[in-house]
Image (cartoon, rainbow, N blue to C red):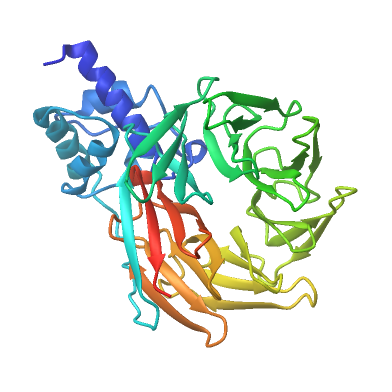
Amino acid sequence: MPNRFAWRSLIALSMCATLSSTGLTQGRRNAPVTLPDGPGKEIVQNVCGQCHGLGMVTNDGYSREEWPRIFGTMVDLPKQQADLVADYLATHFPEKPKPQAVLIAGPASISFKEWAVPTKGSRPHDPLATPDGALWYTGQFANKLGRVDTRTGVIKEYPLTTPGSGPHGLVADQDGNIWFTANSKGYIGKLDPKTGHVSEYQLPAGARDPHTPIFDQKGTLWFTVQGANMVGRLDPKTGDVKVVPSPTPRSNPYGMVVSSAGVPFFVEFGANKIASIDPNTMAIHEYALPNEATRPRRIAIDNDDVLWYSDYSRGYLGRFDPKTGETREWASPGGAKSQPYAISFSRGAIWYVESAVKPNALVRFDPKTEKFQTWAIPGGGGVVRNMMPTQEGNLVLAESGLNMVALVEIAK
């Protein structure tokens, strides 16, 4: 049985990782909060408050049945201790109603494989499918990258060199190296899986919050820098890094893709815009989407270089053709509050996740028939922030809040 200090330390790790892993933004939840009296108050106030604003606790909630499951993904606690905190939070801050997943039948057939990652509280953020059939993930809170052998289920984790790097986005180069954005330390990293060695490429001063990385056809690494409102490129051969500001203030460059012609496109999560960047001059051209309330978060590109975006704020799937400037939108099955997030193109269809419905729903949209099909994610999802297709056309995803990653196998 741990002593009082050790017990508080365990709870600190648990609660800080757990509550942050729900995807809440700390900045808007740091207002002073007075907790109601009751058993467990002291633990929540003195321990959780050391890591973040208590608004992150009070403005969201889980059912009494769900809290132990959430704790279990973060740290192993004696039952009596976990029950005390779960009872307190469930009593005073009960679960708020969330939209239910709307399930729609259709022609596609899929199956899920899910794995809990080894390190408690990792908060796997982005997944990566590599040609060898592996599923990589960023353990953002654990400061590790992980690799799942999807055939055997064996998982290996690789610790990063710089503490608190906050690995975020992932991409692989042609030599099998794994590149990542160090969200919390302002650098781009490269892991050599053979040796475990990590190389770091520091970004210019002020370029905080590197987000999504992607390679173009020439081997240049492009990336968004959300917090600093920038887009950048890195030459792996020379290590040269250059960043440019997004024209619209606070536009928060987010998801990114590259066209067949080698032109990077990205969505601006802080504005109703999609943008392209000239690969030679780095000049940025913005395209305004029709609805001012649109906030595109992730982006996919199909075989015709047509762009598809998840409208997180309005609950829509959007289609934008850069050649014609035409935009079309479809209301997502889960409704206006479903928060479409991760999105990919595979096997002629658009796939995305409604991240606010319970459980998270995997959605398939057929561009030819304009019909939706949906599935509940078995593990719950826990906010699926990103996904991508494998070489075979299947999908990999990260279930952040549940400390899990998944492979979705699509029947041919």
Of all residues, the one furthest to the right in this rendering is: 281
Question: What residue appears at the point 78 percent right and 49 percent down from the top-left corner?
Answer: 218
Q: Quadrant of residue 412?
A: bottom left
Tell me: residue 167, above or below residue 45. Answer: below
- State the image coordinates of residue 82 (x, y, percent, origin top left): 16, 32
- State the image coordinates of residue 145 (x, y, percent, origin top left): 47, 34
Q: Which residue is more in the foreground, 172 or 29? A: 172
Of all residues, the one furthest to the bottom in this rendering is: 369
Report the number of numbered marks: 0
Residue 182 placement, left or right of 80 = right
Q: Which residue is more in the foreground, 373 or 153? A: 153
Query: Does any portion of residue 260 appear in the rendered image?
Result: yes
- State the image coordinates of residue 104 (x, y, percent, origin top left): 35, 79
Question: What residue appears at the point 18 percent right and 28 percent down from the top-left corner?
Answer: 77
Instruction: Give the quarter of the figure containing the N terminus.
Output: top left
Query: Does any portion of residue 312 appear in the rendered image?
Result: no
Residue 403 placement, left or right of 276 = left
Tell me: residue 319, above or below residue 210. Answer: below
Q: Quadrant of residue 309?
A: bottom right
Q: Which residue is more in the foreground, 52 or 392? A: 392
Question: What residue appears at the point 67 percent right and 66 percent down from the top-left corner?
Answer: 292
Question: What residue appears at the point 64 percent right and 43 percent down from the top-left corner?
Answer: 173
Tell me: residue 106, above or below residue 97. Answer: below
